Image: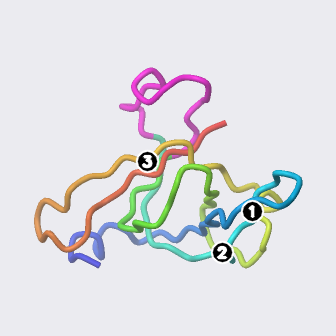
Amino acid sequence: MSNTANWSYTAKATIWRVAGENEYGKKIFHPPELIYCDYGLDSALKTGDIGSGFVIKNTFWTEYALANEGDFILIGESSELDPVKTGADEIKHIIRYADTFERIADDYALVTGE
């Protein structure tokens, strides 16, 4: 973790990455992972800028590079295997930013929506 991220990403979130689908087309998830992040609503993002069809709910800023669209994320810690039961939100869009200062790890904005 870069020094800047260590200073700024102090909140915790739980992410469930999609492992595949079962025979009925329902998502199957890897076990939940804890990540460090910051979060909020990024009012600078406009739905038209990233595609229409959903309402932006939260943005998670993190160095976690393994997230994909379709994964689920929740503010705080959870060990529940089913993200839907926790009220986690689906990641609808991901934006990658360069690590401008130290070039150790890029930063990501994980955008959730409904």
- Does 29 lie within the magenta span? no
Determine the secondary structure under disc 3: strand
Q: Judging from the image, what secondary structure is the residue with disc 2 in? A: loop
The residue singled out by tag 3 in the image is 94
Which quadrant is the N terminus positioned in?
Answer: bottom left
CA separation, marks 1 and 2?
8 Å
57 w.r.t. 34: above or below? above
Give the numbered dot on residue 69: none
Do labels 3 and 1 touch, CB within 8 Å?
no
Q: Residue at x 45, y 72 (%)?
A: 36
Q: Amino acid at mark 2?
A: Pro
Q: CA distance from mark 2 to mark 3?
A: 19 Å
> Residue 62: where, in percent of width, then height?
39, 63
Classed neighbour count for the residue bearing mark 1: other residues with Cα under 10 Å, few (<14), some (14–19), many (≥20): many
Say which residue label 1 marks. Answer: 83
Q: For the C terminus, which image quadrant?
A: top right
Crowd around label 3: few <14 · some 14–19 · many ≥20 (10 Å): some
Instruction: Measure how far apart labels 3 and 1 are at the Cα level.
Output: 19 Å
Q: Is 101 above or below relative to 98?
A: below
At which x and y percent is residue 28? 76, 64
- Stretch of the chain drawn in magenta: 42-58
Q: Earlier in the sequence, mark 1 or mark 2?
A: 2
Based on the picture, tell me whether residue 52 belongs to the magenta stretch. Answer: yes
| Residue drawn at (69%, 77%) of the image | 31
The amino acid type found where label 3 is placed reads Ile
In the rendered structure, are the residues bearing label 2 and label 3 in contact, judged by CB atoms less than 8 Å apart? Answer: no
